[in-house]
């Protein structure tokens, strides 16, 4: 098999890259190790930045998002029983975010890719990237599941969009990694109940962080800070609702509506950056190159920024231009990546209670939160970061 751009991974990064390249007249092949249903139902991100929404629309993938997505003009910070709303459009000159699940973004992009006859191979697991420093890099992969036959995809360029656990990063030999893990994770649940608030609620509590989010007007997505090694099944549904109620407590008459929990899982929290995001003709994009803790809702949005930057550079090069944009790819993306790392770290340490936190630490957190309620400058900084840093 031969193609111009070999893409490993059909998460949001790989799928959107394939779409952007196709729109630019560049052929690609996407290899995905899992099956279609797995990719379409993996429960993850929920928030699309304004810039991500604009990119999906311009790529021709925004039709259902515009119909079913929920535009949100703010979030609520909840602490010490108080509620403070951050008004995004008022603070950022009109910007907002969209609640539209990653599962739906992936479904839309997969449908478009397959409708166009674009090569997208499920159950095709990349085993290794070879010859990244040559003009003919190759992806060795296995078709049709674990017992399938080995094959080779020959490319002009290879892009590793294979997430944190993928194989592409290992083919960037002289890189440097920067990492931080956190001593807590998130227990996330999906529940068949209308969200108890019409915007996201980020709650800081002495018992730990909680987040109220949603997937639709009738499905809630809720998270609880838990110790990193927690087994999701060790929490009963009643215990989860009772703990959410405690952490979302307010001084007014707000209440949390309960409903059947249909899914629960624990996610670890990590900050991670691999530099550079390129080796020869191999490029890394999305979670393959960097991870943020989910508190800032930045992971998917960073992946989108990477592939927009890369698609532009590849279009420039294959259209007869120079290598200049490809050479700048890593540095261009990393600037934005580190801003998202900073913001995600700040949001995480602002809202989570670390094991061993002292009363002094607690008071500092409350003082940091109180800044948002008392300073427009502090609030503007949060609103600008949450609604998104510019791409490129
Ligand atoms: P993905 O989505 O991990 O996709 C990688 C794909 O590569 C495949 N793969 C391989 N394919 C072939 N050969 C191999 N050897 C392969 N190895 C792996 C995998 O099967 C998979 O299909 O990476 P991508 O595309 O870079 O996208 C990144 C995002 O998925 C991620 O950053 C977000 O989900 C992070 N995230 C959030 N991001 C946001 O922007 N807003 C949010 O609100 C948000 N909330 C979240 C999140 C992530 C969470 N978890 C579970 C980590 C909430 C949670 C709980
Ligand atoms: C989600 O809806 O899954 C979600 C929303 C906001 C975050 C993280 C996850 O910060």
Image: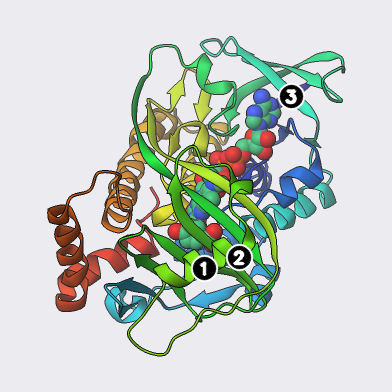
Q: Residues within 10 Å of mark 1 (few under 14, many from 20)?
A: few
Mark in the foreground, 1 or 3: 1
Question: Mark 2 = which residue?
Answer: 238
Determine if the C-beta at disc 2 is less than 8 A from ligand 1.
Answer: no
> Which image quadrant for residue 69?
bottom right
Q: Are marks 1 and 2 in contact (CB under 8 Å)?
A: yes
Q: Residue at x 80, y 15 (%)?
A: 151
Choose between 58 and 351: the one closer to the eye. 351
Whole-percent x, y for residue 54 in the image: 52, 64
Q: Earlier in the sequence, mark 3 or mark 2?
A: 3
Determine if the C-beta at disc 1 is less than 8 A from ligand 2.
Answer: no
Instruction: Say above or below: 158 vs 73.
Output: above
Instruction: Say above or below: 177 vs 385.
Output: above
Whether residue 8 is visible, yes or no, is no
Q: CA distance from mark 1 to mark 3?
A: 42 Å
Q: Which mark is residue 269?
A: none
Choose between 211 and 384: the one closer to the eye. 211
SS of the residue at dot 1?
helix
Mark in the foreground, 3 or 2: 2
Q: Which mark is residue 125?
A: 3
SS of the residue at dot 3?
strand
Whole-percent x, y for residue 110 in the image: 75, 49
Q: Earlier in the sequence, mark 1 or mark 3?
A: 3
Whole-percent x, y for residue 295 in the image: 40, 55
Determine if the C-beta at disc 3 is less than 8 A from ligand 1.
Answer: yes
Q: Residue at x 76, y 48 (%)?
A: 113
> Which image quadrant for residue 80?
bottom left
In the rendered image, which quarter contains the N terminus? top right
How many numbered badges does the structure rendering display?
3
């Amino acid at each position: 098999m031969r193609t111009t751009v070999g893409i490993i991974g059909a998460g949001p990064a790989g799928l959107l890259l394939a779409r952007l390249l196709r729109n630019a007249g560049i052929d690609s092949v996407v290899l995905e190790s899992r099956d279609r249903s797995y990719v379409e139902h993996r429960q993850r991100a929920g928030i699309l930045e304004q810039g991500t929404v604009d990119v999906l629309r311009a790529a021709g993938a925004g039709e259902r998002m515009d119909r079913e997505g929920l535009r949100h003009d703010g979030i609520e910070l909840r602490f010490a029983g108080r509620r403070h709303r951050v008004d995004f459009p008022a603070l950022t000159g009109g910007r907002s975010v969209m609640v539209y699940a990653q599962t739906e973004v992936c479904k839309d992009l997969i449908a478009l890719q397959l409708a166009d006859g674009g090569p997208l191979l499920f159950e095709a697991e990349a085993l290794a990237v070879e010859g990244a420093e040559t003009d003919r890099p190759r992806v060795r992969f296995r078709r049709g599941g674990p017992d399938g036959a080995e094959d080779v995809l020959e490319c002009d360029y290879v892009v590793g969009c294979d997430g944190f656990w993928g194989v592409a990063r290992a083919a960037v030999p002289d890189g440097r990694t920067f990492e931080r893990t956190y001593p807590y994770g998130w227990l996330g649940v999906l529940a068949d109940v209308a969200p108890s608030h019409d915007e996201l609620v980020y709650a800081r509590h002495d018992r730990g962080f909680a987040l109220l989010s949603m997937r639709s007007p009738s499905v809630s997505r809720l998270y609880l800070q838990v110790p990193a090694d927690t087994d999701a099944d060790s929490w009963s549904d009643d215990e989860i609702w009772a703990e959410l109620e405690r952490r979302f407590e307010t001084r007014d008459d707000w209440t949390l509506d309960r409903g059947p929990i249909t899914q629960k899982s624990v996610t670890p929290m990590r900050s991670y950056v691999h530099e550079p995001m390129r080796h020869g003709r191999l490029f890394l994009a999305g979670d393959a190159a960097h991870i943020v803790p989910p508190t800032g809702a930045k992971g998917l949005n960073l992946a989108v920024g990477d592939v927009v930057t890369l698609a532009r550079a590849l279009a420039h090069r294959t259209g007869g231009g120079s290598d200049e944009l490809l050479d700048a790819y890593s540095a261009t993306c990393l600037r934005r990546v580190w801003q998202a790392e900073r913001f995600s770290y700040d949001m995480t340490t602002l809202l989570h209670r670390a094991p061993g936190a002292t009363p002094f630490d607690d008071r500092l957190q409350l003082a940091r939160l109180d800044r948002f309620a008392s300073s427009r400058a502090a609030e503007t900084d949060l609103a600008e970061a949450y609604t998104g840093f510019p791409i490129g």
